[in-house]
């Protein structure tokens, strides 16, 4: 009978301590980030991202890019890019990170330039393609939830690169946002 009481006390102590650790460790570990790229606004584009933290070191996210006006020098019209990040910092989902991403993108077709009147003509319509790439960056998060991020990434178009003026896609930014 004493063994049963002792076993019950040990189990109760173990589960109480485990529950206390979960409460303390999760109080500052918010799982969601939403950011907006400040550099994109200078180029008349919109660039937002959402990230869901799987644990202290890894997360999944999606990045959306859209050109707001036609008078920009950017050949890309829009892109949707899911990504996986691995963090190397000491804090929860912060510090330096490496990422792998895929990108579904719409890019302007090949352009033909004439030297007589400096006109530009599009040879092909917009091209939809998929790219794979890698990148890296740094993220800082405050306890109140504000985050700042710097990132850069490059990838290669996989299927229709011959129908555009380039075969490389890039994503870069200085972003600010909120962790909730």
Image (cartoon, rainbow, N blue to C red):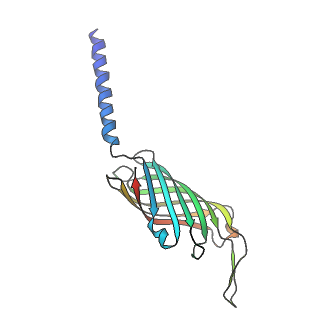
Residue furthest out toward the front:
69
Residue beneath the point at 65% across and 73% down:
165
Depicted 54 relative to depicted 147: above or below: above
Query: Residue 103's spot in the image, x, y percent?
Result: 59, 59
Depicted 25 relative to depicted 61: above or below: above
**Quadrant of the rendered structure where residue 128 is?**
bottom right
Q: Please give left or right for residue 41 compared with residue 91 in the image.
A: right
Depicted 59 relative to depicted 135: above or below: above
Residue beneath the point at 68% across and 71% down:
109
Residue furthest out toward the bottom:
116
Q: Please give left or right for residue 125 compared with residue 8 in the image.
A: right
Residue beneath the point at 34% across and 36% down:
22
Residue furthest out toward the top:
1
Residue beneath the point at 30% across and 34% down:
20
Query: Residue 177's spot in the image, x, y percent?
Result: 41, 58
Query: Residue 163's spot in the image, x, y percent?
Result: 70, 69
- Figure disc tally: 0
Q: Quadrant of the N terminus?
A: top left
Depicted 152 relative to depicted 50: above or below: below
Front residue of 66/7: it is 66
Front residue of 170/64: it is 64
Query: Residue 50's spot in the image, x, y percent?
Result: 48, 54
Q: Please give left or right for residue 138 compared with residue 153 in the image.
A: left
**Quadrant of the rendered structure where residue 170 is?**
bottom right
């Amino acid at each position: 009978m004493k063994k049963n009481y002792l076993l019950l006390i040990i189990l109760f102590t173990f589960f109480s301590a485990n529950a206390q650790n979960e409460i303390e460790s999760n109080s500052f570990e918010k799982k969601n980030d939403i950011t907006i790229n400040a550099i994109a606004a200078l180029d008349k584009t919109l660039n937002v991202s959402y990230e869901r933290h799987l644990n202290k070191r890894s997360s999944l996210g999606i990045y959306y890019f859209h050109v707001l006006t036609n008078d920009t020098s950017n050949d890309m019209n829009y892109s949707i890019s899911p990504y996986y990040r691995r963090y190397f910092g000491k804090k929860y989902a912060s510090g330096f990170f490496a990422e792998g991403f895929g990108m579904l993108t719409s890019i302007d077709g090949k352009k033909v330039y004439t030297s007589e009147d400096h006109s530009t003509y599009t040879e092909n319509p917009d091209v939809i393609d998929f790219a794979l790439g890698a990148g890296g960056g740094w993220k800082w998060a405050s306890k109140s939830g504000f985050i700042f991020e710097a990132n850069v990434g490059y990838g290669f178009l996989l299927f229709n690169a011959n129908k555009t003026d380039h075969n490389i896609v890039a994503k870069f930014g200085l972003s600010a946002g909120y962790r909730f």
